Structures are given as C-alpha cells and as structure tokens.
Image (spheres, rainbow, N blue to C red):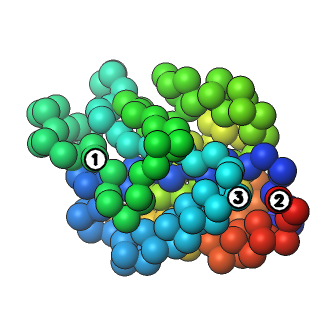
Amino acid sequence: MALTTLDPNTALIVVDLQKGIVGSPFIHHIDKVVERSRALLNAFRERGLPVVLVNVAGGAPGRTERPRHSEPFPAGWTDFIPELDQQPRDIVVTKRTWGAFASTDLEDRLKALGVTHVVVTGVATGTGVEATARQAYEQGFNVTLALDAMTDGRPEAHDYSIENVFPRLGETGTAQEIVDLLGTRSA
C-alpha cells in the first residue's frame, strides 16, 4: 500500500540503532539508514511528536535450534549511536525480545500520549523492525514503514519482509516521503 496519510498523533520508533549492532554486516550501507532515520527524528522532534528509541539487551528465553549469544554484552553495546542525538523527551525502551512491544510498557506509554500511529525504522528488517511493526499492528496502531531507513544482514529476510509482510501491516514509503507528508500537516 502506498503512503497516504499519517494520523495527527504519530510516533516514530527507531529500532536497535545502537553501538553494538551498527558495525554488523548489512546489505545496505548503515550510514544511509542512520542518515534517513536522523531526518525522520528531526522532523518528528521539530513537530513535538513522540520519538521512541529502542535498544536490545538480550533475548527471549527458550530453546532454539540456532545457538544464541549467551555471554554478557561488552560495555557500551546497548548505547544508542550519537547520530540519534538522544533527547530527554525521547521515550527509551530496552527490549529483550525481537519486538519493542512484547514484555515492555511501550503500548501503555504511547496510548497514554494519545498515539494512534507509528512509523518504524531501524535494524534488522526481518527481526527487530518486523516484530515491532507486527506487534504495533496487533495492538491497534496504524503502521507506516520507512523502507529506505532499514536494513538487514540477510537479503532474503529484508526482501521478504518488504514484499510480503509489510504491505499486510500498514503503509510503506521512503523517509523523505514521510518527512514531506509531515510537512503538509498543520502543526
């Protein structure tokens, strides 16, 4: 679905742009993802709209077929990258699952602010971004995904999410299209 509108009270959710992750190998240049996420951050902050910065500090319990990281993370691993320019007004969520809504108070915090719509960006497309978008959709939020402000280490996961999952969860567009749409709204 093409990008058509943003609700009056839309929040931006930036997923896992943290020091321990941005150095990972991705299929798109992380600098471009950060640059586009930063443009969205600036646009949302200029309009006084909620900004959510999400980091990950572990994983959900339970057995998996693939080994998971079990050692403590190095110091600074969960710190947000400086380019996000974390502000005191930003909502910070530390997750221990793929999505930012499971096992956190994010839904309650956003609904207390009257948020009805979220724009999601970050890494990785097929895990943190997709899980956060799915959970937002399941909690009744309208969802928009900034396709050029996300990436993944796995091309097949990135492409599958963009082509098959995201159109079923909400609307998609570029970061610039979202910024432009914000600019057409009355303050």
Residue 28 visible? The answer is yes
- Taking 117 as reference, is 61 left or right? left
SS for callout 2: loop
**Closer to the camera, 58 or 183?**
183
- Taking 131 as reference, is 58 left or right? left
Task: State the residue position of label 1.
Answer: 79
- Which corner quadrant of the image does residue 84 belong to? bottom left
Task: State the residue position of label 3.
Answer: 47
The tally of labels here is 3
Image coords of residue 183 (percent x, y): 78, 71
Identity of the residue drawn at 47% across and 58% down = 122
SS for callout 3: loop
Rendered view: 32 above or below 102: below
Image coords of residue 129 (percent x, y): 52, 51
Asked whether the beta carbons under mark 1 and mark 2 sit within 8 Å of each other, the answer is no
Label 3 – label 2 distance at C-alpha: 7 Å
Tell me the quadrant of the picture where the N terminus can be found.
bottom right
Comes first in the chain, label 3 or label 1: 3
Around disc 2, counting alpha carbons within 10 Å, would you say few (fewer than 14), some (14 to 19), or many (20 or more)? few
Label 1 – label 2 distance at C-alpha: 32 Å
Asked whether the beta carbons under mark 3 and mark 1 sit within 8 Å of each other, the answer is no
**Closer to the camera, 59 or 121?**
121
Nearest-to-viewer mark from 3 and 1: 3
Tell me the quadrant of the picture where the C terminus can be found.
bottom right
Comes first in the chain, label 3 or label 2: 3
Task: State the residue position of label 2.
Answer: 187
Image coords of residue 162 (percent x, y): 61, 64
Label 3 – label 1 distance at C-alpha: 25 Å
Asked whether the beta carbons under mark 3 and mark 2 sit within 8 Å of each other, the answer is yes
- Which corner quadrant of the image does residue 160 belong to? bottom right
